[in-house]
Amino acid sequence: MDRFKESLLRLVVETSTNLPPDVRRALAEAHAKEPQGSRAALALQTIAINVDMACAHCRPLCQDTGLPTFEVKLPPDAEQFRLSTDIAAAVADATRQGILRPNSIDPLTGRNSGDNLGEGTPVVHFEEWLSDEIEVRLLLKGGRSENKGAQYSLPCELNGLGRAERDLAGVRKCVLHAVHQIQGQGCGVGAIGVAIGGDRATGHEWAKRQLLRPLDDVNADGRLARLEAEILRGANSLGIGAMGLGGDVTLMACKVAALHRVPASFFVTVSYDCWALRRLGVVLDRKTGAIKRWLYRDDAPTVRMARDERLPTTGRELRFATPLSEPQVRALKIGDVVLLSGVIHTGREALHRHLKTHPAPVSLEGAVLYHCAPVAVREGDRWVIRAAGPTESSWEEPYEAEVIRRFGVRAIIGLGGMGPRTLAALNDHGAVYLSAIGGAAQFYADRVVCVEGVDFLELGASEAMWHLRVRDLPTIVTMDAYGGRLHADVERSSARELARLVASGTVE
């Protein structure tokens, strides 16, 4: 199998950079359902441009390339150890090339391995079958999506929904409850895999495995097919929309499996994945390791997704250059589109924790902090940003208010909004929260003119403080300096709709 590693590397590259046709179709259908000019339509147009850019330049669709999970089917006499070794080598090569972000961290030391290899990474599941071919499917599922999974043990009480019993009505309640909890923090629109039954471990495994199904397939079990359709309709009636900004489409698909269980346990497990549902597969020649055919791919050539190469402008966008002043920030209101130019600074949890009690390496007076863990590669004597989408902001909630107060930060860019302490700090000190479109790593990397410097690189590239010069980086004001918070408004309205579904008997 001389070509096995070569084939696996190609699979990793294609999975990270080229969205499969069924996901492209689902995103296009979602875009068509949103009113032109709406926040949801703007988000989905950004996503479409990003998909085209990633494919054209062979760059990661999202900077969070997740934990690679391989599902391998192979003949009984195949060399499993050899296959494992070549999979690891392919993952390490893809990381060195900037196709995968280094994501493998030792939980005891906090050190990043730098090549996505370590105890338990990558994840490889082997299954024997009676075919002479080798089938490999790869799922790249980001950390934000993984964090939004949920597991319920029925019967249980659900806040605002009442009791969920050990029946399909209870299952529906649990799944819709899980979708509502995600809001804008999971880079919607998304897809969910659901496992009914099993034990705790197999529930998680089978729920994630449902994400390997084509989005447009129909469940062979009629009962589960009806359940999938009911959950999808219910989720899309909640009004959460793309990125939690409000809209008609929240989920692209719902896929359900049912496992036998023991009498004492009735689990419902939900695995969520974002719009960047990165999974592909190959069938390999067992003798040479060469690719014989691809899975999930249509025979038709890849076509552009975006209606236009650039975001449509209305003339009402506000153009600001950093550093920002308090009067500029106080003039902003919820829903304003802000195009930022100048220097911005990235920072995630590790940086925020440091800044809470230590001085900043650069002046942050009037600065913009970007919750981002970019993919950065060294080219000669300079750094180049290969991917730069936003990361979830809730991780920084324990620290953000103090950072704003201590350093005079005027704007935060992130994903999914923040909590009451940050909202109060925005009001007290004159700052705003700006939402970026989750996963649009190439779209935002294209707005980076250059890297002006980096601090705390010893924390790893994803946790370092990168100083980026940007041009016309688009954002939406979703938390203003007067206590307004779009995310909370959408959460309240979607909670009312979910309660109405229950009261009307639709969920029951």
Image (cartoon, rainbow, N blue to C red):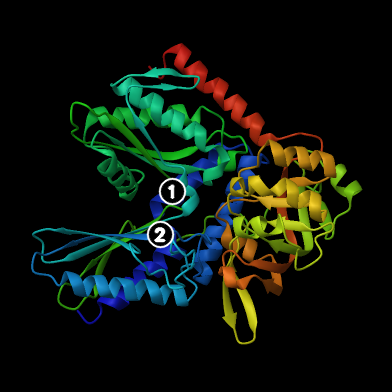
Crowd band around label 2 with a 10 angstrom C-alpha radius: few (<14), some (14–19), many (20+): many
Check the image and report above or below for 172 versus 43: above
Crowd band around label 1 with a 10 angstrom C-alpha radius: few (<14), some (14–19), many (20+): some
- Res 310 visible: no
Residue 375, position as x, y percentages in the image: 56, 68
- Lateral position of residue 358 relative to residue 271, left or right: right
- Res 293 visible: yes
Dot 2: element: strand
Which residue is rendered at x = 48% and y = 68% of the image?
112
Q: Quadrant of the C terminus?
A: top left
Q: Earlier in the sequence, mark 2 or mark 1?
A: 2
Dot 1: element: helix
Residue 166, position as x, y percentages in the image: 28, 21
Residue 165, position as x, y percentages in the image: 32, 19
**Frontmost residue, 112 versus 388:** 112
Inspect the image, locate mark 1, and give the three-letter code of the amino acid beneath it: Glu
- Lateral position of residue 365 relative to residue 131, left or right: right
**Frontmost residue, 492 versus 263:** 263
Which residue is the site of mark 1?
146
**Frontmost residue, 107 versus 3:** 107
Q: Quadrant of residue 77?
A: bottom left
Q: Are marks 2 and 1 in contact (CB under 8 Å)?
A: yes
**Frontmost residue, 423 versus 361:** 361
Residue 180, position as x, y percentages in the image: 50, 31
Which residue is rendered at x = 28% and y = 44% of the image?
201
Which residue is rendered at x = 25% and y = 27% of the image?
223
Inspect the image, locate mark 2, and give the three-letter code of the amino acid beneath it: Leu
Residue with the most extreme top position = 504
Q: CA distance from mark 2 to mark 1?
A: 10 Å
Q: Which mark is residue 67?
A: 2
